[in-house]
Image (cartoon, rainbow, N blue to C red):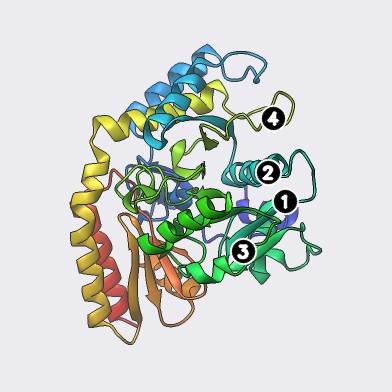
Amino acid sequence: MDTAALYDSYLMKNYGKPPFAIARGEGSWVWDTEGRKYLDFICGIAVNTVGHSHPAWLRKVEEQLRQVVHVSNLFYVPGQAVLAKRIADQAGEGRSFFCNSGAEANEFLIKLARLWGRHKSGGKEGVCYHVLTAKNAFHGRTFGGMAATPQEKIQGGFRPMLDGFAYGDFNDVDSFAKLITPQTAAIMLETIQGEGGIVPATAEFLQGIRKLCDQHKLLLLIDEVQCGIGRTGSFFAYQQLGIEPDAIGMAKGLGGGFPIGATWVRRGYDELFTPGSHGTTYGGGPLACAAANAVLDIIEEENLLASVQQRSPVWHQQLRALVERYPQHLSAVRGRGYHVGLVVKGDPLEWSARFRAGGLLTVRGGSDVVRLMPPLTVTVSELNSCVTILDEVLANH
């Protein structure tokens, strides 16, 4: 069977042409169908939190497969209840809604903002519903997510966009303050802009935005779809910056490879949704929640947050040394923990192809960044191997 030919004949053309098929994975490594081995620092785009085929994750998912896979939200799902409590243990008092993806989690945030605006307006709709987001943000490809994402590559071809969005400059509190009107209901931000090039929010920025939200009675909505679930060394990346959000969108790394998204909403706003106001058929199903609870078990039992905190600084230092060694190719290293961007000179797609040829899988992030996102279970030896491959490729170009 010629997979490439089948793709060419039967799949939509919304993705670029893949380089090959991955046949299997183990830990931080994958093998293609020809048997070539690669160090995987894409991790399914920050999804495979505990690497490929982690034995404890597999065991929990297999156990659930033998019991029940899907029941819908017409019935209690015990694993969903446990997962909601575990998220609240990290985020604070509040409730969770479970879905299937980051885009859906962010759609929930946008709908929450509209419900809050209606509440602020004494029950009137269409009076207070605007959401402020940041330039160069990425919040998904649904119509709400696209409207919240002011990038031509996302919005082009799909206009007119959903009404009610305005865009400030990331890490510039004043630019957001100038956009606030009586119609504004919320501010929605990534803690680290992922698709926008691994650009972290500063503590001063998020603390300033928190004050603006308190002053104007706005919701602070935090998108941790890509940077959350331990990737930066804390369960949520915002926890390092001295703020408390009103709601958080998450997905990607939560299921460790199985699709699941979630939105946590702080107590006080958690009853804006009422029965029938939102729903999903698959969200929070038994299998998805078993996968997510297994990820959280492994993070705790293997002390992975401490591992990220301890190992990432040395790795970052090695990457910065490459910037100094190859200024003709690299200009900076950005990010926190295992959510890192190499700012490259030239096309990041070409650089990713070169690194792939050297045995390292990376992915573009923005117009000039190659993202490095290893699993939280990555070893020191594997981090060193990443640097060695980068060094060899850079030296030969």
Q: Quadrant of residue 201?
A: bottom left
User: Which one is earlier in the sequence, the residue at label 4 or at label 1?
Assistant: 1
Q: Is 355 located above or below residue 304 in the figure?
A: below
Tell me residue 229's x, y (percent): 39, 42
**What is the three-letter code of the residue carrying label 1?**
Cys
Any mark on residue 16, and which? 3
- Asked whether the beta carbons under mark 4 and mark 3 sit within 8 Å of each other, the answer is no
Cα separation, mark 2 vs mark 1, equals 7 Å
Within 10 Å of the Cα at label 3, are there few (<14), some (14-19), or many (20+) other Cα atoms? Answer: few
Which secondary structure, mark 2?
helix
Mark identifier at residue 203: none
Q: Amino acid at mark 2?
A: Lys
Between 359 and 199, which is closer to the camera in this rendering?
199
Q: Position of residue 74 (x, y in %)?
A: 67, 16
**Amino acid type shown at disc 3:** Gly
Give the mark nearer the N terminus: 2 vs 4: 2
Residue ID at (60%, 36%): 100
Q: Residue at x 42, y 42 (%)?
A: 24
Q: Mark 1 falls on what kind of element?
A: loop
Q: Name the residue: 61% across, 60% down.
A: 132
Q: Are marks 2 and 1 in contact (CB under 8 Å)?
A: yes
Tell me the SS state at disc 4: loop
Image coordinates of residue 382 in percent, x first then y, are 24, 54
Can residue 162 be seen by looking at this rendering? yes
Asked if the residue at tag 3 contacts the one at tag 1, i.e. Cβ–Cβ closer than 8 Å, the answer is no
> CA–CA distance between discs 4 and 3?
33 Å
The residue identified by callout 4 is 279
Give the labeled residue for mark 2.
Answer: 120
